[in-house]
Amino acid sequence: MKYQIPAVLWLVVLGVSPAFAGELAVSIDGVKKTSGTLVVTLMDEAAWDGKGKSIQVQTVAAQSAIDGKGRVTVKFVDVPEGSYAVGVIHDENDNHKLDTGLMGIPKEGWGNSNNPKVWRKPYFSEVKVNVGAAPLPIVIHLH
């Protein structure tokens, strides 16, 4: 009699854990202008700290995406299980940067996951969201 061992069990036997992928649905509200592009970036802690590359980046034309209420939704799929941060910039004039005024105060819309109320770059612990196998919806309010 032969026994068949399921593939997942082999991964456990070999000491390898399967990497489950999840989905992160990001709703962005407070979009005030229909010009430009929304740049939505999914980052792990290294990327957030400027020591690595972004996991995924999505761009959405603000004009075509606004649902009439100043809200845009994007989805990140096949996201490996783990902790991530999401950053949003509304590049209203499409110059590929966040325009700032005096003392570095942004002139264009921006926001982060968990919507921390700080006047500095938030710490990763303040913006992290945990992605698992189940879909995760979050809302980011633009400033």
Image (spheres, rainbow, N blue to C red):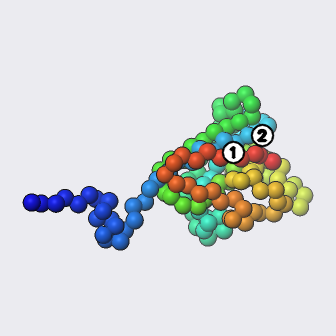
Residue behind mark 1: 139
- Viewer-closest of 49 and 98: 49
Q: Residues within 10 Å of mark 2 (few under 14, many from 20)?
A: some
109 left or right of 76 in image: right
- Viewer-closest of 16 and 69: 16
Residue at 26 percent of width and 58 percent of height: 6
Q: Amino acid at mark 1?
A: Val
Q: Position of residue 85 (x, y in %)?
A: 64, 58
> Residue most toward the left?
1
The image quadrant that residue 7 belongs to is bottom left
Foreground label between 2 and 1 = 1
Q: What is the number of callouts on the image?
A: 2
Q: Is residue 38 visible?
A: no
102 left or right of 52 in image: right
72 left or right of 98 in image: left
Q: Is residue 27 visible?
A: yes
Please report whichever mark, 2 or 1, sits nearer to the chain's N-terminal start: 2
Secondary element at image label 1: strand
Residue at 77 percent of width and 46 percent of height: 142
Residue at 16 percent of width and 60 percent of height: 3
Q: Position of residue 72 (x, y in %)?
A: 67, 37
Q: Position of residue 112 (x, y in %)?
A: 71, 53
Secondary element at image label 2: loop
Residue at 71 percent of width and 47 percent of height: 140
Residue behind mark 2: 30
Q: Amino acid at mark 2?
A: Gly
Q: CA distance from mark 2 to mark 1?
A: 11 Å
| Quadrant of image for the N terminus | bottom left
Q: Residues within 10 Å of mark 1 (few under 14, many from 20)?
A: some
> Residue most toward the top?
68
